[in-house]
């Protein structure tokens, strides 16, 4: 609990500092500094001194952050360096945020880390030694080219489950595959095992304490590598005799548009299997539903959300009878909820991340990678015994507030109802799993004008289409940082664009003329600047009961934040209008556009949370400060 309390105090401290910084930025943006500099020379000198001090602190901060993230940080010697070296600043900030995101995900258990055991004397000789550098992105033929059922990245929505039969069914497959609207009103297929999962009851043994069953010694057992369909059928027969099985997946997403389940690890109390899920006949693994959907066999995962989605997307597999040890950690209020923490607590594992980002498509699989893949499930059933006993001991089944084991299994049941849907996005709003909205929302300090924003959207669209055609990840085609930098520079012609494409962009560089045509087309259509995009609202003609229809039909951030921004501007409109007009100076064109923006804003009919107010104030403060800085030069 001490670790959890330390994190909470750190979180509160960081939030307090952020709020203080935001208030300061807003106060600075509200002042007419150019006017004060003109009428009061002493203010000008103070501004110069403070600018030098801020630049010095910023450089120190960038150097420290860059060193921690392994990124070269720029040195800011004067105000012009901010513009000239902006790409370097963004690289450091992005790397820091990505590292923080990863660390928080690992701390909360949202993502799993691959940890090997400590080299104790009992198994030290058995543990394979790694003599080669871990391969993260192997130069190899893409396995999906040999699949009997190749991925279709342009398949129309909704995504249809790939089941051909339905073992352990209470409702037939035909009756289960109904198309229904989701919360946003978009049609989707129901989860084919929803009827069975919602009505299932876990075996009584799950709710009783029992003596934990020790895992088999690693040094006296070996994992079976399954790469034939006959091997799958043999494994299936053994799995049918188990009461519990542990399952984990290894996933690859760099050389595929949607990603690939590259390996599946399965363990019983007596045996471990490592299943090659990249075989051309991989779709035949659907036969494992005979066990995976049997509610009498408990399936133990840790952090199973993405596993549930990947299994149905790639292999047509569904899970009924899931026990996710992540939810056990949650109910027991462990200081951390990652698999790494559980392995350290119950099996004396220590963290070693070298295989976390390995390319699990490699065949044949090196011995050391086999070893670490196996360790993900080899100890998981023993951990399941330990956490389940703690839950049962702490629970009062008659008291809803103290039924910890009941809550853990109910959350696991909800997790197993997760569904896959085709990735996509709205080109106009950037909404969607593959959209740009989330990125610009977190990076609104970019302050793109209308042309830069058009370039950004054109590059994003071209990258997504190319990635789908070539079955590559979008970052393999062109990284988001490169897209942002090209948009910021706004190349005037195709030659300038070509010079900005990185040398390792093997798909983008030969297609620079195609990219340029996309950019010209988007520029010709025109559009909003980033600031006006954030402040735009749906017109009255598409409103209902005072709220934009989009906000009523979707739960995504765009509609929520537009409504939130509307409320902020309505309350602060006189002051905000005055400050923004003052910052524009004699820029009559932009003043007219700003006046239009304010005139189109309508008050919302719903309240918003304080956190969203703060979040939007951050975005507005950054945009306003950026514009103010430009006006002072």
Image (tube, rainbow, N blue to C red):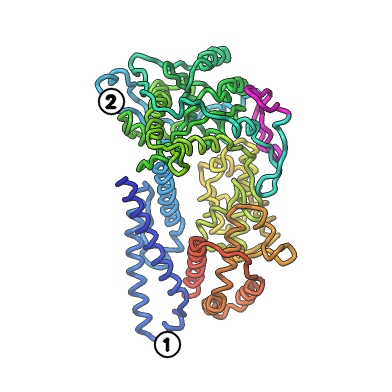
Magenta part, dominant SS: loop
Residue 244 x, y percent position in the rendering: 47, 22
Element type at mark 2: loop
Mark 1 touches mark 2? (CB < 8 Å): no
Q: Is residue 150 left or right of residue 209?
A: right
Which residue does the image show at 60% across and 77% down from the upper left?
591
Give the extent of the magenta segment.
149-174
Magenta region includes residue 154 = yes
Is residue 337 shown above or below 237? below
Return the residue nearer the eye: 314 or 341: 341
Instruction: Give the x, y percent position of residue 326.
Output: 44, 37
Question: Residue 119, which numbered label?
Answer: 2
Front: mark 1 or 2: 2
Q: Residues within 10 Å of mark 1 (few under 14, many from 20)?
A: few
Q: Nearer the viewer, residue 99 or 243?
A: 243
Percent position (x, y) of residue 336? 37, 41
Q: Residue at image x 36%, y 52%?
A: 8
Image position of 377 with respect to 153: above or below: above
User: Marks 1 and 2, Cα distance to the nearest angstrom?
Assistant: 72 Å
Query: From the viewer's perspective, is residue 576 above or below residue 544?
Result: below
Quadrant that contains the N terminus: top left
Numbered circle sitting on residue 39: 1
The label shown at residue 482 is none
């Amino acid at each position: 609990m001490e670790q959890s309390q330390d994190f909470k105090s750190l979180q509160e401290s960081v939030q307090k500092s952020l709020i203080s910084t935001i208030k300061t930025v807003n106060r600075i943006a509200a002042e007419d500094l150019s006017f004060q500099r003109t009428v009061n020379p002493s203010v000008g000198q103070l501004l110069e001194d403070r600018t030098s001090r801020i630049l010095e602190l910023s450089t120190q901060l960038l150097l420290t952050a860059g060193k921690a993230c392994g990124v070269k940080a720029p040195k800011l010697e004067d105000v012009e360096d901010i513009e000239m070296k902006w790409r370097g600043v963004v690289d450091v900030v992005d790397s820091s945020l990505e590292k923080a995101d990863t660390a928080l995900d690992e701390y909360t258990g949202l993502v799993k880390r691959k940890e090997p055991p400590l080299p104790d004397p009992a198994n030290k000789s058995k543990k394979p030694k790694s003599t080669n550098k871990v391969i993260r992105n192997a130069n190899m033929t893409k396995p999906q080219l040999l699949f009997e059922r190749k991925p279709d990245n342009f398949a129309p929505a909704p995504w249809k489950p790939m089941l051909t039969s339905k073992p352990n069914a209470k409702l037939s497959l035909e009756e289960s595959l109904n198309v229904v609207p989701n919360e946003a009103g978009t049609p989707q297929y129901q989860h084919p095992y929803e009827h069975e999962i919602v009505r299932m009851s876990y075996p009584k043994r799950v709710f009783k304490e029992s003596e934990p069953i020790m895992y088999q010694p690693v040094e006296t057992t070996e994992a079976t590598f399954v790469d034939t369909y006959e091997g799958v059928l043999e494994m299936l027969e053994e799995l049918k005799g188990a009461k519990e099985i542990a399952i984990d997946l290894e996933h690859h997403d760099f050389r595929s548009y949607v990603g690939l389940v590259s390996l599946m690890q399965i363990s019983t109390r007596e045996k471990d299997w490592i299943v090659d899920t990249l075989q051309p006949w991989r779709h035949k693994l659907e036969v494992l539903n005979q066990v995976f959907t049997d509610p009498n066999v408990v399936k133990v995962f840790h952090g199973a959300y993405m596993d549930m989605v990947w299994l149905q997307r790639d292999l047509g597999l569904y899970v009924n009878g899931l026990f996710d040890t992540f939810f056990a950690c949650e109910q027991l209020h462990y200081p951390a909820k990652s698999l790494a923490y559980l392995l350290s607590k119950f099996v004396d594992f220590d963290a070693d991340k070298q295989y976390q980002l390995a390319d699990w498509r490699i065949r044949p699989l090196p011995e050391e990678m086999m070893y670490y893949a196996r360790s993900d499930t080899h100890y998981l059933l023993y951990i399941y015994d330990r956490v389940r006993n703690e839950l049962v001991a702490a629970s009062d089944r008659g008291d809803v507030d103290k039924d910890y084991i009941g809550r853990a299994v109910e959350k696991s049941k909800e997790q197993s109802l997760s569904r896959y849907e085709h990735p996509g996005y709205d080109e106009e709003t950037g909404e969607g799993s593959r959209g740009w909205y989330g990125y610009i929302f977190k990076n609104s300090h970019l302050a793109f004008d209308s042309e830069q924003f058009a370039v950004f959207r054109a590059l994003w669209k071209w990258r997504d289409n190319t990635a789908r055609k070539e079955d590559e990840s979008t970052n393999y085609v062109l990284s988001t940082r490169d897209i942002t930098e090209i948009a910021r520079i706004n190349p005037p012609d195709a030659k300038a664009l070509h010079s900005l494409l990185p040398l390792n962009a093997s798909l983008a560089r030969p297609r620079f003329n195609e990219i340029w045509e996309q950019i010209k087309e988007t520029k010709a259509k025109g559009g909003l600047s980033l600031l006006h995009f954030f402040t735009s609202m749906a017109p009255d003609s598409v409103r209902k009961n005072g709220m934009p229809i989009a906000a009523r039909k979707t739960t995504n951030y765009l509609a929520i934040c537009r409504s939130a921004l509307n409320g902020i501007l309505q309350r602060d409109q006189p002051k905000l209008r005055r400050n923004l007009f003052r910052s524009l100076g004699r820029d009559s064109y932009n003043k007219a556009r700003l006046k239009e923006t304010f005139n189109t804003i309508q008050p919302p009919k719903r309240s918003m949370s304080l956190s969203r107010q703060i979040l939007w104030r951050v975005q507005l403060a950054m945009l306003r400060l950026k514009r103010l800085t430009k006006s002072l030069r």
